[in-house]
C-alpha cells in the first residue's frame, strides 16, 4: 500500500497498478484483494497458538481500549479485538473487503469498519489507544506517510504494533527471500529501530487442515514458478513461519 513496488505480502508477484482511495493512492494487495476466500484459509492457518496476540499483550493490554486495525481486510481479526476493547475501528482501502468486514461484524455494536488508508486514517486526532497492522502497508522504508498518521491519531501512552515477515529465519522466511530478494531484513530492522520501534521475534507457524488448502495459499502468495518449486520441496500441512512484531509507545 505505501509505495509502488512489488507487494511484500505477495513475494515474486508483479507490481499492481495503484488505485485511488479518496485522496490517496493505494497499491493493491494481490493475495486478499483478488483471492479473499483463499486468504481466509490463510488467516485460519496462521498463528494457531495465538503467539502474536500473546506477544502484543505482554506489551500493552487492549482491555477497554480504543483499538484500530489498519488494513483489516475482511475483518477476520475484528471480533477478537472487540471481545476485549471498548471500541474497534477497522480501516481498509478495498471497498469489497470493507463490505465483507462489515457483514462479519454487523452484530457487534462496538465495531465500525471504514474505507481509508494508512496515509489518511478516518479517525480523530489522539483517539486511539492500541493500533495493529498485520501485513498491511507498514513494510519499512517508504511507509513514512503512514507513520506520520500514527503520530496524529495515537493517544498519549498508546501503543502501535506492526506485524511483518521475518526474512532472516524460518522456512517461510526462506521462501520470502526467494520471492523478494530485494528486501533486505537488515535494512528493514534499521528502519524501525532508528525510529524508536522495538522488535519482538515470534514463531507463529502455519497449520492447515488439508494439503490442498496449503497449496492454494502458497499459489496466491508466490509467483507460479516459485510456488511450484516450494510445493515440490515441502511436504505436509504445516510450515514453520517467523514474524517480527514491532511496537512503539506514543
Image (cartoon, rainbow, N blue to C red):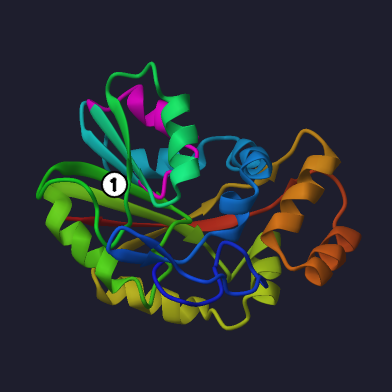
Q: Which residues are magenta?
A: 70-86
Give the residue displayed 60% in from the left and 59% down from the top. Answer: 30
Taking depth in this image into account, of 99 and 43 the one nearest to the observer is 99
Q: Assess disc 1: are there few (<14), some (14-19) or many (≥20) residues with their C-alpha within 10 Å of its C-alpha.
A: many
- Name the element at disc 1: strand
Can residue 58 be seen in the rendering of this structure?
no
Whether residue 129 is visible here, answered yes or no, is yes
Vertical comparison of 122 with 190: above or below: above
Give how far across and how far down residue 192 sits, in percent: 33, 71
Assess whether residue 118 is covered by the magenta stretch.
Answer: no
In the visual, does 137 lie left or right of 61? right
Q: Is residue 160 left or right of residue 217?
A: left
Q: Residue at x 59, y 40 (%)?
A: 43
Closest to the observer: 7 or 181? 7
- In the displayed orientation, state which residue is furthest to the right: 232
Q: Which residue is mark 1?
A: 131
The answer to whether residue 110 is above or below residue 153 is above
Please name whichever residue, 125 or 99, is drawn nearer the observer in this view of the structure: 99
* Quadrant (top left/top right/bottom left/bottom right) for the N terminus: bottom left
Decide whether residue 71 is among the magenta residues. Answer: yes
Query: Is 191 situated above or below 239?
Result: below
The x, y position of residue 57, in whole percent, is 34, 38
Pinpoint residue 79: horizontal percent, then vertical percent: 42, 26
Q: Position of residue 61 (x, y in %)?
A: 27, 35
Residue displayed at 41% across by 30% down:
102
Amino acid at each position: 500500500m505505501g509505495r509502488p513496488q512489488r507487494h511484500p505480502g505477495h513475494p515474486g508477484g508483479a507490481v499492481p497498478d495503484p488505485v485511488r482511495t479518496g485522496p490517496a493512492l493505494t497499491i493493491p494487495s494481490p493475495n486478499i484483494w483478488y483471492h479473499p476466500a483463499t486468504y481466509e484459509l490463510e488467516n485460519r492457518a496462521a498463528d494457531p497458538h495465538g503467539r502474536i496476540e500473546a506477544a502484543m499483550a505482554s506489551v500493552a493490554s487492549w482491555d477497554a481500549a480504543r483499538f484500530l486495525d489498519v488494513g483489516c481486510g475482511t475483518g477476520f481479526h475484528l471480533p477478537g479485538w472487540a471481545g476485549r476493547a471498548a471500541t474497534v475501528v477497522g480501516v481498509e482501502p478495498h471497498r469489497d473487503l470493507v463490505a465483507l468486514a462489515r457483514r462479519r461484524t454487523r452484530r457487534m455494536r462496538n465495531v465500525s469498519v471504514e474505507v481509508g488508508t494508512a496515509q489518511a486514517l478516518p479517525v480523530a486526532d489522539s483517539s486511539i489507544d492500541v493500533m495493529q497492522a498485520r501485513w498491511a502497508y507498514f513494510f519499512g522504508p517508504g511507509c513514512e506517510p503512514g507513520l506520520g498518521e500514527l503520530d496524529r491519531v495515537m493517544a498519549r501512552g498508546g501503543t502501535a504494533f506492526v506485524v511483518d515477515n521475518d526474512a532472516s529465519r524460518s522456512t517461510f522466511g526462506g521462501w520470502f527471500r526467494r520471492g523478494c530478494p530485494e528486501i533486505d531484513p537488515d535494512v528493514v530492522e534499521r528502519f524501525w529501530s532508528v525510529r524508536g520501534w522495538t522488535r519482538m521475534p515470534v514463531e507463529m507457524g502455519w497449520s492447515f487442515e488439508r494439503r490442498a488448502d496449503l497449496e492454494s495459499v502458497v499459489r496466491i502468495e508466490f509467483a507460479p514458478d516459485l510456488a511450484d518449486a516450494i510445493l515440490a520441496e515441502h511436504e505436509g500441512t504445516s510450515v514453520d513461519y517467523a514474524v517480527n512484531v514491532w511496537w512503539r509507545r506514543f
